[in-house]
Image (spheres, helix red, strand yellow):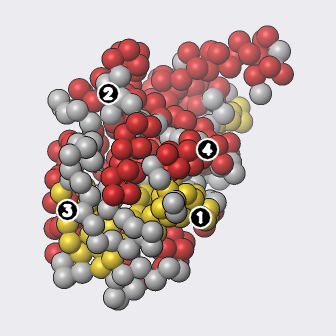
Amino acid sequence: MTNSLSAVEAKYEAQKLAFAPIYFQCMVALRKLGILKYISSKRNGTNIYAISKDLNLTEYGVRVLLEAADVSGVVEYLDTDTVKLTKVGYFILKDRLTDVNINYVDDVCYDGVKSLTESIKSGKPEGLKVFGNWKTVYEGLADLPDQVKKSWFEFDHFYSDDAFPYALKIVNESNPQYIFDVGGNTGKWAFACCDYDENVKVKILDLPGQLNVAKKNAEEKNLTDRIDFHQIDLLDDFQKIPKGADTFWMSQFLDCFSKEEILSILKNVHQASDENTNVYIMEPFYDNQEYKAAEYCLTGTSLYFTTIANGNSKMYSIKVMYDLVKEAGFEVVEEFPLVGNSYHTILRCRQIKN
Ligand SMILES: C[S@@+](CC[C@H](N)C(=O)[O-])C[C@H]1O[C@@H](n2cnc3c(N)ncnc32)[C@H](O)[C@@H]1O
């Protein structure tokens, strides 16, 4: 878009970026104070004095927020004192994707992303220090403050949840008996697999914090006879993935690592598999999205990896993943693009035959 803009338009775009954090916090305040909800409940618009009185806020407070909401296209003024929600305002208030993204940016990223410059220089997630002294967010996930944890998990699950029903059908076409869910987190995929097929068994591989939560969840669901657990740090090359799986599943997992680390993990999977093993990789690749909004969210998420998660990972293009798969000794034998209209593509991989 950028080169077709006039200088005046381009300058305006630049100012939007300059003030972006302030306008972002304005949206957060409008949501938290109930102002957008109040306006949306009045079909023909509402008066600023009524908002101020009914929500017990000063007229100054309501006015200053709504003036910013007006220039950012969230509300429109019908006259000097009356406002109405726009289409953008509707999405800020009611759209689940926007809701999940706003909470994630506000609770998980906002304070730490101030350290982005330092993170780029050091290659470390300097912003993570606002929460604790861990090497990666995954080490500390179970100990994050409750609100931060809630927003992190809602963000993580929102993206994968929609894809899971379709992914289950795809993976079950090869009739798996024993699935290793690498980076299985709190067990959502493992439980879905057990629900889908009463004979399948699953092993969840993850760091101790997440594995403990998964175990507790499995106990509550009476699934410990079908799901077992393997504690592993896949950044440690000496920790080998055990053999025994006919299927490997890695969902939203490889994007948590640098290219070199992905290669090492895929080689680790390779040593644990044979020529009959199916290796499924499910990832939201930024370059094969249907909507511009999806590409925008994924590219922004990469910067969260830089400054909060681990300092060296990102969302990848599909070509990069194909190359890494090949270098690790696998080939992509099937590609399932954007499963169920989600953001994810599934790659089914097998060992390259010699
Ligand atoms: C973004 S979550 C994805 C969770 C889940 N697979 C999904 O689709 O929603 C990444 C998972 O990888 C795990 N993980 C990150 N670093 C790891 C490591 N070094 N070794 C093992 N697991 C790791 C995290 O603990 C987390 O559960």
Q: Earlier in the sequence, mark 4 or mark 3?
A: 3
Q: Earlier in the sequence, mark 1 or mark 4?
A: 4
Residue at (59, 25) in percent of width and height: 67
Please identify the quadrant where the N terminus is shown.
top right
Q: Position of residue 175 (x, y in %)?
A: 46, 83
In the visual, does 206 lie left or right of 63?
A: left
What amino acid is labelled 3 in the image? His
What amino acid is labelled 4 in the image? Lys
Q: Which mark, by number, is residue 319?
A: 4
Examine the rendered structure and indicate whether residue 37 appears above or below residue 175: above
Dots 1 and 3: beta carbons under 8 Å? no
Q: Which of 98 and 244 lies nearest the eye of the viewer?
A: 244
Find the distance from the CA under tag 1 to the CA under tag 4.
14 Å
Any part of residue 319 in sight: yes
What amino acid is labelled 1 in the image? Val
Bin the neighbour count of mark 3 within 10 Å (Cα to Cα): few under 14, some 14-19, many 20 and up: some
Q: Which residue carries the number 3 mark? A: 230
Numbered disc 2: secondary structure? loop
Find the distance from the CA under tag 2 to the CA under tag 3.
27 Å
Q: Which residue carries the number 1 mark? A: 333
Numbered disc 1: secondary structure? strand
In the visual, does 52 lie left or right of 43?
A: left
Find the distance from the CA under tag 1 to the CA under tag 3.
28 Å
